[in-house]
Amino acid sequence: MDNPRKDLEAIFRAGLAAVDPEAAVLRHVKRDGSELRLGSRSVDLDAVRHVYVVGAGKGTAPMAKALEDLLEDRIREGAVTVKTGHGLPLRKVQVMEAAHPVPDQAGVAATRRLLEVAEKAGEKDLVLAAFSGGGSALTPAPVPPLTLQEKQDVTRLLLACGATIQEINAIRKHLSRIKGGGLARAAHPARTFSLILSDVIGDPLDVIASGPTAPDPTTFQDCLDILERYRLLDQAPPRVVSVLREGRDGGRPETPKPGDPVFDRVENLIVGNNLMALLAAKDEAERRGYKGLVLTSRLEGEAREAAKAVAAIAKECAATGRPVKPPACLLFGGETTVTLRGDGKGGRNQELALACALALEGWDRICVLSAGTDGTDGPTDAAGAFADGTTAAEARRLGIEPRHYLDRNDAYGFFERTGGLLRTGPTRTNVMDLICVVIR
Ligand SMILES: Nc1ncnc2c1ncn2[C@@H]1O[C@H](COP(=O)(O)OP(=O)(O)O)[C@@H](O)[C@H]1O
Ligand SMILES: O=C(O)[C@@H](CO)OP(=O)(O)O
Ligand SMILES: [Mg+2]
């Protein structure tokens, strides 16, 4: 407890370890000879003709590795798509790389391959799918007559307009042959198990990676309403709007809905999420002598506003021992957003830490680490940043005014100069962000 930053880093890393994608799959999928157990289900491998592996998302190379290690003798064919630079060399499963967050031609070719593998699977076969955050951008399969260019254009518009991931993915699902249950349709009638590492608050199966094996509750009409809400009907590529209108008017099939027979033999299983990381972080905090408290895995909203709430709770703890007496570790998870106003460099976690530095000024016994579990916070090489009650005053001694850096969204510039960045490198996992606070 003498070195709060060291404790916080260890607490954060314990959270990461708990959602290591390979270990997460191995915790949920077990093999005993010809018996394969997936969650609470059991499959007799002797009754299965071929096993196929498919998947997409930043964390799916290690997920596929886990499946390969368990089932190499039984896998007929497999392919997964990861973000460029997130691949691993595998023996049986082909690992393909493509662009994120805006799709590219490599993604189109990779997705064709995923659908081809899923379509080969028949009634006697078993499809094991793996999905994680980033899966949407990595699987462009535009419905005719749309082109990749049109998908790129609408993706850029949606990412920049302030729409939620639920809204963005409602539209992506209705322009795609694989999203919104499309992969389940391709794999039908094979038995399909989908293993999912969640990077969305509440773990909604239809939203994570745009739910390739999940029923889609959204409609063409919802998509048109979303474009209207963000004033994008005139800016979106005209053929995208025509496809959505044709669909609304009954001229195109809806995505498969809950109860659709394509899901009769499909099971979706969340193997890792933000809460699992928080609970492991809490255990590590307790090993280090702090009383641990997980407050939420659903933190959202503007990063600098969320920071004020986090700081307020930490100050209450320091001042009155509520809701827990120090030494304590308060744990928050989720994903905040940043409305960019300035031209600085940063990410939502660094911005949250910088806002905490201001809100906690003078509270010497409080220290915060806010970091992204994927190891890259915004377009920077840092996972996040530390801040404590002395950060703001020390910066000013160096002639650095924290407020000015926050105003310019330049949290990276601030912490680079004052020494608060946490660099982990790409972690190959992705369950949103962790905000760990120790109060001594
Ligand atoms: N200068 C900045 N300061 C704070 N946040 C930023 C800055 N530049 C970009 N961001 C935020 O980073 C987010 C993208 O972060 P990233 O970690 O790449 O997302 P994801 O977790 O989906 O991979 C965007 O939502 C954007 O608001
Ligand atoms: O792929 C997606 O749809 C989203 C959510 O799962 O992930 P990301 O924000 O990383 O692109
Ligand atoms: Mg990130």
Image: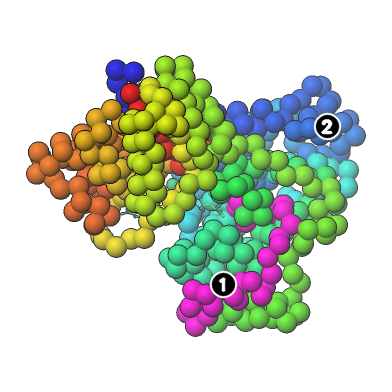
Give x and y (percent) for residue 351: 32, 48
| Spot occupied by residue 227 in the image (x, y as percentages of width and height) | 54, 75
**Residue 253 appears left or right of 272:** right
Disc 1 to disc 2, C-alpha distance: 41 Å
Q: Quadrant of residue 52?
A: top right
> For residue 423: magenta?
no
- What kind of residue is marked 2? Ser
Q: Which residue is mark 2?
A: 42
Residue drawn at (60%, 47%), measured in percent from left and top? Answer: 202
The residues colored magenta run: 208-236
The amino acid at mark 1 is Ile
Question: Cβ(mark 1) to ligand 2 < 8 Å?
Answer: no
- Judged left or right of residue 395, residue 330 is right
Q: Position of residue 298 (x, y in %)?
A: 52, 46
Q: Is residue 366 above or below residue 195?
A: above
Residue 53 against residue 108 in the figure, above or below: above
Instruction: Determine crowd level at label 2: few under 14, some 14-19, many 20+ residues with C-alpha closer than 10 A.
Output: few
Residue 186 point in image, percent of width and height: 77, 56
Please tell me which residue is depicted at 39% across the width and 28% down the height of the picture. Answer: 321
Q: Is mark 2 within 8 Å of ligand 2?
A: no
Tag nearer the camera, 1 or 2 = 1
Residue 403 visible? The answer is yes
Q: Give the numbered dot on residue 275.
A: none
Residue at left offset 64%, top offset 42%: 196
**Marks 1 and 2, the one that precedes in the sequence:** 2
Residue appearing at x 43%, y 50% in the figure: 336
Quarter of the image where the C terminus is located: top left
- Name the residue tied to disc 1: 226
Asked whether residue 232 is drawn in magenta, I would say yes
Classify mark 2: helix, strand or loop: strand
